[in-house]
Image (cartoon, rainbow, N blue to C red):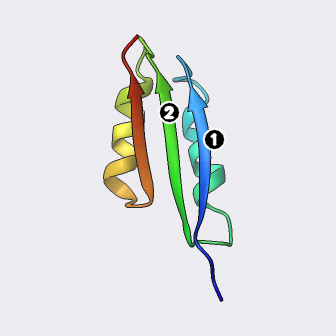
C-alpha cells in the first residue's frame, strides 16, 4: 500500500534558498505526499516564490503567519 505522508517545512525570509529547498522535496522518488509550507511572516520575496510553486504543484499547501 502506498501511504500518503505529510512533509513540513517552515520558512522565514529565505528568498535566496527557498527554491532549492522546494525542488529538493518535489524531486523525491516517493510522490504520494502533501507538502505543507509554513511562512512565518516573511517580508522579502519568499511568499511570491511560494505561490509560484503552489500554482505548479497541487501537493503544495501554504500556511501564512501574519505576525
Q: Quadrant of residue 10?
A: top right
**Residue 17 at what x, y percent from top left?**
61, 29
Q: Secondary structure at mark 2?
A: strand
Above or below for 58 versus 31: above
Q: Quadrant of residue 6?
A: bottom right
Q: Residues within 10 Å of mark 1 (few under 14, many from 20)?
A: few
Q: Are marks 1 and 2 in contact (CB under 8 Å)?
A: no
Q: Residues within 10 Å of mark 2 (few under 14, many from 20)?
A: some
Q: Quadrant of residue 67?
A: top left
In this view of the protein, which residue sits in the foreground, 56 or 60?
60
Q: Earlier in the sequence, mark 1 or mark 2?
A: 1
C-alpha span from label 1 to label 2: 13 Å
Q: Secondary structure at mark 1?
A: helix
28 relative position to 16: left or right: right
* Residue at horizontal 36 percent and vertical 16 percent from the top: 66
Q: Which residue appears farthest toward the bottom when viewing the image?
A: 1
Above or below for 16 versus 9: above
Quarter occupied by the N terminus = bottom right
* Residue at horizontal 66 percent and vertical 51 percent from the top: 24
In this view of the protein, which residue sits in the foreground, 11 or 52?
11
Residue receiving disc 1:
21
Amino acid at each position: 500500500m502506498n501511504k500518503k505522508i505529510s512533509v513540513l517545512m517552515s520558512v522565514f525570509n529565505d528568498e535566496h534558498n527557498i527554491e532549492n529547498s522546494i525542488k529538493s522535496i518535489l524531486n523525491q522518488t516517493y510522490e504520494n505526499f502533501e507538502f505543507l509550507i509554513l511562512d512565518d511572516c516573511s517580508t522579502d520575496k519568499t511568499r511570491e516564490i511560494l505561490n509560484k510553486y503552489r500554482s505548479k504543484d497541487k501537493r503544495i499547501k501554504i500556511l501564512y503567519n501574519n505576525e
